[in-house]
Structure formats: structure tokens, C-alpha cells
Image: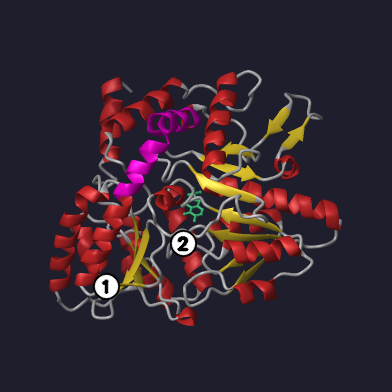
Amino acid sequence: MSESEIIELLEKAEKLDVLTSGKFFAYIYETGDEKLKEIALKALLQFYNKNMLDFTVYRSAVYFEREVVNFCKRLMNAENAFGTFTFGGTESIMLAVLAARNYFLKRKGKGVVPELAVPFTIHPSFIKAAHCLGLKVKIFDIDEKLKADVEGLKSSISENTALIALSAPNWPYGTIDPIREIAEIAKEKEILLHVDACLGGFILPFFERLGEKVETFDFRVEGVTSISIDVHKYGYSPKGASVILFRDVELKKESIFVNTSNPGYVFINTAVLSSRSVGPLASAFAVIKYLGEDGYLGLSKDVLDARNELLNGMKRLGFKSVGPVESSILSLFNDDADLISFVSRMRELGWHFHLQRRVEKYRIPLNIHFTISPIHKRTVVEFLKDAESALERREERKEIKVDEILESIKSGRFDSSLAPILTEMFEEESVNELAKEIVIDLFG
Ligand SMILES: *Cc1c(COP(=O)(O)O)cnc(C)c1O
């Protein structure tokens, strides 16, 4: 194909994503800063064809990784910690669980199935890590503030617990677990404790500096042994950038895989993946250098302003928060509104946010989720205007037919923002099967 033909195809593909800047409340973390984007892209392209596989050859990767990890260490108050750059939060979490499992098996011996104790609100990547690495998952309750329940935690740990994981904050409700209280228990029982700050790591420290009340969750808390923190979220770098930090060098060693017995090259992997472009790492470095702590502080102020304005505006429209508001996440419900219609109408107006399912056990109603970005400071007024008009349009909702939903997902007329409709209708297992069928149908 000629260059122009390829460009045409690329442009056509780009139109498949109905993406408007400032209108997404998930997936992307937009600052609206064009200069930041320019610098991030420059670094991404300049290093796209270098390989993180061999850091003895690509020394730039060592330099960038040390710098990015050091910035994260300072943010998490652990100058003496050890860290690894990964391509995403899920990969960081995989390494945390791997290290904990190996550390546990070394001490407790083989023949024991190590366990992972997590609250109901933990990110699914922990369940995935346990699934891949052969740990048994013990899910414990959350309390009325939608935080890990301490009594629940106590009854779910045993001598087989290899790791406890908590969130700062969790994705669905944005609440921060009682890290200090649980860290004391973990320390006393000599159980490793991971804090998932994938979402909060680059923003909660700045909320704290802005005078917000933030529960201490980082390495200042004795007993916290590892932390995951995503640069590709509130670090504002392109996707493919996260860091896992370990308090002790022994734990980091357990996350490294080395093989020198194969007949080819010496295989030293600090992460799950092996060959990787240096591009995302270089880009993460460039964005961190561009913003610095002051830059992050300013953007965090924008997020805080946008969050408060959105929350107050939505309250005027009859919405309430499902839990205490403690971070850059809002999850809202409205007893008088049909949220399914609301999400669809707003989608027609170009806004994208998710419906989250009802959880009867904790008396959580159907709710909508917002991850706030700095750019929303500019779009919140327009959002509230549209939200008001979307709420006013009160026509009967058509009956929802499963076949139609599946067809619309496949054809792109419908996306996952309304997925709770399916989880409300079916048992978990059949929804999981449906999801796999959709994947096979779409990708082959
Ligand atoms: C985003 C996120 C992760 C990891 O997700 P990736 O998509 O793999 O980066 C883990 N925990 C929380 C709370 C998150 O929000």
C-alpha cells in the first residue's frame, strides 16, 4: 500500500472511536495541556525502536527507569524502597502478588496453597494475578463507609495468608481503606501488605498538600510492604507506564525472573513482559520532568475544583454520593431518576461514564461512576447543562432485550457503560461466558 492509502485507513480507524476530548470520565486522564502532549509524543517516538529487554545494551532504559521510580518513591515517602517500571497497573500488581507468593513459599515450604485476602472493592487485577499464580482468594466485606471492614479482614486471614491488599483509593467508589489499622494487624501477624495506589498514587499526595483530609496510605505506614502506582493515570503519561515499589530488597528480588540455562541469550526479566519498547518509559520520564511536583499540584487543584463543582451541580439535580467523597472519584445515585436512560441519553450527547451495578448486600443502589481529570474543569458547566436536560426527558424506556444488547455491542452501537444491565439479568457465570463470546466474535 502507498503511504497515502495507509494514512487514509488510519484516519478511518480513528473515526471508529467516538472520542471527544473532555467528555470521558474513564480510560483517559486528560490535562488539556498541548505542550505536555507534544513532549510526551516526542519522547515516545524518539525511543520507540529501543528495547527494554536488555538493559546492558539500552542504558537509556536504566536511566529513565531510575528517574521515574525515584519520583514515585518520593511521592510514596520511601527514599529507601526498591522499584520496577512496568507497562501498567495490572502488571505491577502481578509482580506484587508474585513476590509475595514466592516470599511466602520460601518461608512456609511447598504443599501449602498461599492465600490473598482482599476487600470486595479491590481491583480485579488481583483476582487475575491470584488466578495466574495459584493463590486462593479470600474476599472480605466492606463497611458502611464502603471501606475494607477490619473485622472482616481479621476473620479472613490465617497462617496461609501470603498477602493482604487494600486500595488508596478503590476504583468503584473512590474510598480509601483503613490502611493504618490493617497495617498494624498485618505487621503483628507477619503478613505482607500491598497498597494499590494505581489510581491514587499521583493525586492523593497532592490532595493532601491542598489541605484535603487524606488517610495516610504510603510507606509512612509501617507494615505496608509494597505499593503499585500508575504513571499512565494521574501521572498523565501515555498508556504503558506504571511502577511497583517494594519496601525491602528481598521482596523485589522475589519479583525478578532469571534464566541462564537456555542456549540463547541471558534472560533477566524484572517485569512480566520481556521485549518492550523504551518509548512509554521515556515518555513517562519526559512528562514527569515537564510537570514536576508543582505541575502535579496545579493539575490536582483543577481536579479537585472540577470534582467539587460536578458534585454540587449533581446534588442540585437530586444525586447523592454512595459513599464518603475522598478522592478524584465520584459515584452517584439518584432514587428519582432512571439511571439507565440517563446514561444512554448522555451518551447520545457525547458524554461517556459508566453505570455501576447494585450491590444488595451493602445496600448500594445502581450508580454512575466519574473519574475526574483536570480537563473537566473546562467542561463541567456544559456537562451539568446536558445532565439537566437529559433528566428532564422522561419518556418510557423500551424493554431491554438481551439479543439486541449483544448485537449492539458487536456493531458498536452500545458499549460497556451499560454492562450492569446484563449483570442484573444473569448469573455471574453466564455473563462471563457472554463476555468471552463477544470477544471471540469481535476478534476471531
Ligand atoms: C487502573 C487501576 C489498576 C490497574 O489497571 P491497569 O489498567 O492495568 O493500569 C489497579 N487498581 C486500581 C484501583 C485502578 O484504578
Residue nearer the viewer, 36 or 389:
36
In this picture, is 261 found above or below 21? above
Task: Determine if the magenta segment contains residue 290.
Answer: yes
Q: On residue 435, which mark appears?
A: 2
Q: Position of residue 382 (x, y in %)?
A: 16, 55
Q: Which residue is depicted at the point 36% across and 53% down?
A: 26
Task: Identify residue type, mark 2.
Answer: Ala
Whether 384 is among the magenta residues is no
- The amino acid type found where label 1 is placed reads Phe
Indicate left or right for 87 with 422 as reference. right
The residue sitting at 30% across, 20% down in the picture is: 2
Q: Is residue 161 above or below residue 379?
A: below
Q: Is residue 440 above or below residue 147?
A: above
Numbered mark located on residue 171 in the image? none
Pointer 1 residue: 319
Side of 305 relative to 280 (left or right)? left
- The part of the image, by quadrant, that contains residue 320 is bottom left
Residue sitting nearer the eye, 100 or 297? 297
Residue 377, given in percent of the width and then of the height, sits at 24, 50
The residues colored magenta run 281-302
**Earlier residue among tags 2 and 1:** 1
